Image (cartoon, rainbow, N blue to C red):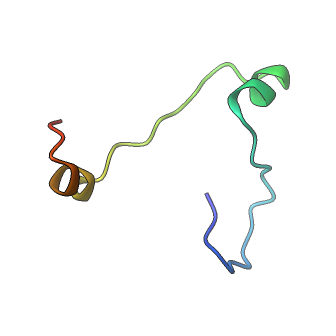
Amino acid sequence: MSLPGGTVSLGIETLDIASAKARGAKTLVLPPMPAAIYRHTGLKP
């Protein structure tokens, strides 16, 4: 994750899923959906 104009970095590359898998990734972690998304889209948890 990065913010426009951000200057702080952990030095972790942004990869798509296929590239990460090719580099040996075995786990995909999905963050929880913020409550604001539910309110604005009408989705139910």
Residue sitting at x 61%, y 23%: 27
What number of labels is visible?
0
Residue sitting at x 69%, y 29%: 17
* Corner quadrant of residue 9: bottom right
Residue lying furthest front in this view? 41
Pinpoint residue 35: horizontal percent, then vertical percent. 22, 54
* Corner quadrant of residue 31: top left
Q: Is residue 25 above or below residue 7?
A: above
Q: Report whether 4 appears left or right of 35.
A: right
Q: Is residue 25 above or below residue 8?
A: above
Q: Is residue 36 above or below residue 5?
A: above
Q: In terms of depth relative to the viewer, which is nearer, 18 or 28?
A: 18
Q: Is residue 22 above or below residue 45?
A: above
Pinpoint residue 23: horizontal percent, then vertical percent. 85, 26
Residue sitting at x 18%, y 36%: 45
Q: Report whether 45 appears left or right of 15.
A: left
Pinpoint residue 18: horizontal percent, then vertical percent. 75, 24
Image quarter where the N terminus lies is: bottom right
Residue sitting at x 80%, y 49%: 13
